[in-house]
Every structure is written in C-alpha cells, then in structure tokens.
Amino acid sequence: MAEAIARHSIDSGLLEEGIDLFVTSAGVDASAGSPPTNETLTVLSKLGIDHVGVSTPLSADLVKNADLILCMTSSHQIAAQEMLPHDSEDQNKIQLLDPEGDIEDPLGTGQTTYDDLAQRFMQLIPQRLREVFVT
C-alpha cells in the first residue's frame, strides 16, 4: 500500500520536475512474490490508485542502494540499519515513516484498519517525500 501511495503521489506532481525516483516496498519478514492483500487492493481502488505488485524481502543491496528508507516500525528500522556497516553515514537514510512512532502492520485486522492506514499514508508519505526531496 505504501509503495502504491508513494508512486501515486509522485505521479500526481508531488516533486519538482527532473527528480526521478525509483520507489519500491520491501518487508523485513516478507516472502518473495506474494500478492497484496484483498484489503490493500480494495482501499487502493477506493482511492483511485491502480497497483500491481508482489512482496519483496528487504535485502542488503536494497538498503545500500536506496537514497531513503522509510520504515513502519523501529524494529524494521533497526533491521535495515543492521544491513549496513555500523559506522556508515548511510544509517541516517533509514528513518521512521512517522517520526511520532511505530505504525503497526494491519495484516489480519480487517478492512477498516486498512482504510484508516491508507488515509494516514496519504498524509505521511507525501509529507516525508517533500521533506527529503523538495528544496
């Protein structure tokens, strides 16, 4: 859901012309190739966002090559940071999506939770992207 909302925000003109971003989502505990949940597809459809994708596990290569990594929880942030050398300046590019705290995974909680999370993502993701990529 976060990946689709980030792409939608960028495609809707969130960032300045000439900024070219590759956006992907990866999970600390994700298995490769699983489709989005029905709840995710339902809420994205309600928002008018088309999305086709499958799950991707987080890897050291993704962490190393990313300009920014926004994590849902502090445990995800730590897991990503552990994929880099401890003294790497790149540690700073791994941040919480919500600086106020963790966002819990909605898996198994029902459509209402997904709907609420999507609204939260629609605010947080553009805000965080602007903070980093808009001068």
Image (cartoon, rainbow, N blue to C red):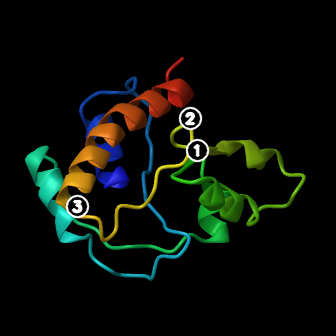
| Residue located beneath label 2 in the image | 100
Residue closest to the eye, 41 or 66:
41
Q: Residue at x 37, y 25 (%)?
A: 17
Give the mark, 1 or 3, whose residue is nearer the N terminus: 3
Secondary structure of the residue carrying numbered label 1? strand
Q: Residues within 10 Å of mark 1 (few under 14, many from 20)?
A: many
- Residue type highlighted by circle 2: Glu
Q: Horizontal and vertical percent for residue 23?
A: 42, 51
The answer to whether residue 127 is left or right of residue 64 is left
Question: Which is closer to the viewer, label 2 or label 3?
Answer: 2
- Classify the position of the C terminus by image quarter: top right
Q: Horizontal and vertical percent for residue 96?
A: 58, 44
Quarter assignment of residue 132: top right
- Residue type highlighted by circle 3: Thr
Secondary structure of the residue carrying numbered label 3? helix
Q: Horizontal and vertical percent for residue 104?
A: 45, 56
Q: Residues within 10 Å of mark 2 (few under 14, many from 20)?
A: few
Secondary structure of the residue carrying numbered label 2? loop
Q: Horizontal and vertical percent for residue 11?
A: 26, 37
- Residue type highlighted by circle 1: Leu
Could you tell me how far apart the alpha carbons at marks 2 and 3 are, in whole angstroms?
A: 24 Å
| Residue located beneath label 3 in the image | 40
| Residue located beneath label 1 in the image | 96
- Please report contact status of discs 2 and 3: CB closer than 8 Å, yes or no: no
Could you tell me how far apart the alpha carbons at marks 2 and 1 are, in whole angstroms?
A: 8 Å
